[in-house]
Amino acid sequence: MKKKRDKYTSRDIQNEIVRIMATDILRDIADSVSDAKFFSSLADECTDAFNKEQLTICLRWIDQALEPNEDFVGFNEVPNITANTIVGAI
C-alpha cells in the first residue's frame, strides 16, 4: 500500500495555518506587554486604494531591560473614521 503524502496547498489550509501562526504571535505580544511596566497603543487610520478605511494598531512597550519595543497588532477595517468608531475598534 502506498503512503499518501499530504499537500497543504489549498487556500483554506494555508489561511488556517496563517491564522494559527498569527494567534500564536499575538499571544506572545500580549504576554510581553502584560509583563511590561509601561506600554502605549498607537492607532492610525488610512484609506486604501479601494476607498476602504483601515485602522492600523501597534503596541509600544518597555521591557525589563528598559529597551523600547514596538509590535504591529493588526489592520482593522472600519466603516468610517469617526472618533467613536475608532475608539470602538481599539
Image: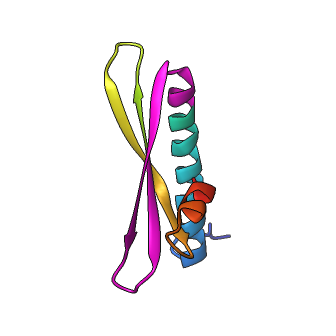
Give the quarter of the image for residue 7.
bottom right
Q: Is residue 33 above or below residue 72?
A: above
The span shown in magenta is 31-58
Q: Residue at x 60, y 74 (%)?
A: 12
- Residue 84 in magenta? no
Estimate the x, y position of residue 1 in percent, counting from the top left: 68, 70
Quadrant assignment, res 4: bottom right
Q: Looking at the picture, does residue 10 appear above or below residue 61?
A: below
Looking at this view, name the residue that lies furthest to the top: 65
Residue at point 42%, 29% (across, down): 61
| Image spot of residue 34 (x, y percent) | 57, 26
41 or 67, which lies in front?
41
**Residue 28's spot in the image, x, y percent?**
53, 35
Report the residue that reaches farthest toward the right: 1
63 or 85: which is nearer to us?
A: 85
Q: Does the rendering let one see residue 44?
A: yes
Q: Quadrant of residue 69?
A: top left
User: Is residue 50 shown above or below 67?
Assistant: below
Is 48 displayed left or right of 52 in the figure?
left
Residue closest to the far front: 83
**Residue, x 51% and y 29% (percent of image)?**
33
Query: On the picture, is 48 further left or further right than 41?
Result: left
Number of numbered discs on residues: 0
Q: Give the side of residue 20 with respect to residue 54, left or right.
A: right
Describe the colour scheme in one phrase: rainbow
Which residue is found at the position 40% from the left and 42% from the top? 71
Is residue 5 at all visible to an observer of this figure? no
